[in-house]
Image (cartoon, helix red, strand yellow):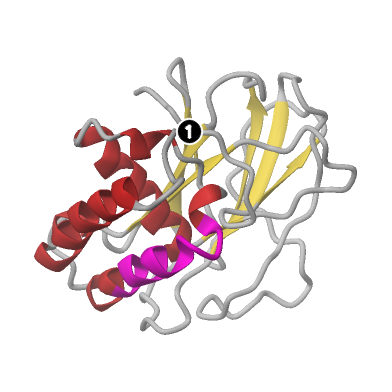
Amino acid sequence: MQFAFKLSLGICFFVLSACQSGLSGLVNTHSDPPNPSQNQTTGQSQISPRTKGSTLTGIVVWPQEATPLNDLRFEIQAITPAKTWKTQSNPQGQFKLENLEWQTSSSPLRMEARALANPHLVFKCLYLPSTAATAPQTMEMTLTSTAIVALLDQARDMNSQVMQLSPARLSQNDTRPLVDALKNSMMPYFNAGLKAPLETMPEVATLLDQTVKKLETMPGMLP
């Protein structure tokens, strides 16, 4: 898999920490676990940029507007062109991946969280930590980050220059309404009854195509 994107955004939020060995699937930094149907951030640690053997922790945020699944655990994958790391979240959607042999100078991590209750329900994001950060970075996987990755994937499939845009650029005021519309088109399908990948749903697929074309024509959007 190739990545043409760079990420510097507060959409998909993960927290990174110093080096540890092994792989752990459960993390809960709150004494009182959050309600998984609420939009909450959990987990705090940090990373030293451009290092190997780092730990990444974060949370998958189930949309507040959607009915929660009976089981809100997820299979988590961190994907680079060279390697994929896997773990499983706890019932609050919290997870930790340890010993990531990944550097910030490489392609961004593609993060995917697949619901154990329905493998067609997949949260996605692209993550590249800020090298200028002076404090721990807090990050989340959300339906908004999923919509942005779907849009960039669609642009790549269409061989559109839109695939060169970063998720941060797509979060700015002039483009955010397009992303929100795409997210809203996904919401009705985000339930236990989904029978195929979210991006293949007719309304979502049509809007993905239209949004890429719209971005291509927006003044100053592309080089």
**Relative to 137, is 148 on the left or the right?**
left
Residue lying at the far right of the rendered structure: 134
Where is residue 40 drawn, in percent x and y?
Answer: 64, 73
Going 43% across and 19% down the picture, which residue do you hit? Answer: 81
Q: As displayed, is residue 147 above or below residue 180?
A: above
Q: Quadrant of the N terminus?
A: top left
Q: Quadrant of residue 66?
A: bottom left
Q: As displayed, is residue 195 above or below residue 40?
A: above
Residue lying at the far left of the rendered structure: 202
**Relative to 26, is 193 on the left or the right?**
left
Front in this rendered view, residue 96 or 123: 123
Residue lying at the far top of the rendered structure: 82
Q: Quadrant of the C terminus?
A: top left
Q: As displayed, is residue 158 above or below residue 136?
A: above
Where is residue 174 drawn, in percent x and y?
Answer: 49, 63
Front in this rendered view, residue 85 or 183: 183
Going 82% across and 33% down the picture, which residue do you hit? Answer: 18
In the image, the segment drawn in magenta is: 171-184
- Residue 145 counted in the magenta span: no
* Residue 4 visible here: yes
Query: At numbered mark 1, what does the secondary structure look like: helix, strand or loop?
Result: loop
Where is residue 181 drawn, in percent x and y?
Answer: 33, 71
Amino acid type, label 1: Phe
* Residue 197 visible here: no
Q: Which residue is the site of mark 1?
A: 5
Label 1, residues with CA under 10 Å away: few <14, some 14-19, many ≥20:
many
